[in-house]
Image (cartoon, rainbow, N blue to C red):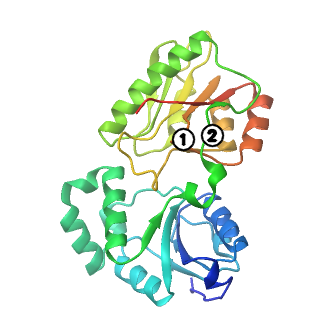
Amino acid sequence: MADTKQSTGSPAAGPKLAILAGGGTLPARIAEAVRGQGRDVFVVAFDGHTDPQTVAGLPHLWSRFGAAGTILRRLHDEGVGEVVLAGPVRRPSFTELMPDWRTARFLARVGTRALGDDGLLRAVVREVEEDGFRVVGLHELLRDLLTVAGPVGRLMPDADAERDIARGVEVARALGALDVGQGAVVQQGIVLAVEAIEGTDAMLGRCAGLIRPGPGGVLVKVKKPKQDRRIDLPTMGVTTVERAAASGLRGIAVEAGGSLLVDRAAVAEAADRLGLFVVGIEIPQ
């Protein structure tokens, strides 16, 4: 696809923002919010990951993951000052990556740190910052995205669900400490599934055939210990609620202040309609 240039906003409103856009609606929401503040945006869209609608009417570049040199040069040419990573991506294999010289040098330098998502993303952030850009978090641009403590809809977890939540937090934080995943599903104290490279949706899909008789399980999502809050915070929205319900779960618990909640009102409506609780939980650090 061809890349385009288009001027929006005023430099006086703040530095030009580059959005490294994965899937979902978050990149478009960020672009809309930032342009509403009068700032310029530039979107880097990734082949096979970014929804083409995300870049409609916006200055952008289509690229593959392995073209780091081209991407960084273009950001300098565009006068970008800040960079944000937005939206989920499927981690590419080395064959899919097809690294250019800049990417190959980066991968050689990070070595085994690239084995886990958090380690890799932190290395990416350092690389981008060393090139002169400031990396910002999604919650710095859309402050209402951060999950707050307490129920999102009308329903609340009962004592049994609270015990499953506590177990889920324990398991998810252990996974996060190993840089594996951010979520787990627990029912009646039994761990039904844990999240790895497949992501939350695929994990929930596996749970449908594992649910036991009695009260349904609980999905728990927390950030990894020592995780940089600017990158890859656990994220949930209406789709997560719908898939949790379809898998036979009865609730979702996400870390308050350490996760992103996309469209709180819509999540509350979906949770109430489907009979699930959704709650932000505070976790001692």
Q: CA distance from mark 1 to mark 2?
A: 18 Å
Q: Residue furthest front?
A: 12
Q: Could you tell whether 87 is left or right of 134 in the image? A: right
Q: Does residue 94 appear left or right of residue 108 in this picture? A: right
Among the 4 quarters of the image, the one containing residue 108: bottom left
Mark 1: few, some, or many residues within 10 Å (few <14, many ≥20)?
many
Across and down, in percent, residue 31 comes to: 65, 69
Q: Where does the image place residue 38, in percent across and percent down from the top left?
A: 69, 77
**Rendered position, 113 above or below 62:** above
Residue holding disc 1:
257
Is 128 or 94 nearer to us in this picture?
128
Give the structural element (helix, strand or loop) at label 2.
helix
Sequence-wise, which precedes: disc 1 or disc 2? 2
Q: What is the crowding at mark 2: few (fewer than 14 residues within 10 Å), some, or many (at least 20)?
A: some
Residue 124: which disc?
none
Q: Is residue 251 above or below residue 38?
A: above
Q: Is residue 136 above or below residue 218?
A: below
Q: How many marks?
A: 2
Percent position of residue 20, x then y:
50, 69
Amino acid type, mark 2: Thr
Residue at the image point whose x is 45% and y is 27% from the top: 169
Report x, y in % for residue 276: 70, 26
Q: Secondary structure at mark 1?
A: loop
Seen at 63% across and 82% down, the residue is 12
Q: Quadrant of residue 270?
A: top right
Identify residue for label 2.
240
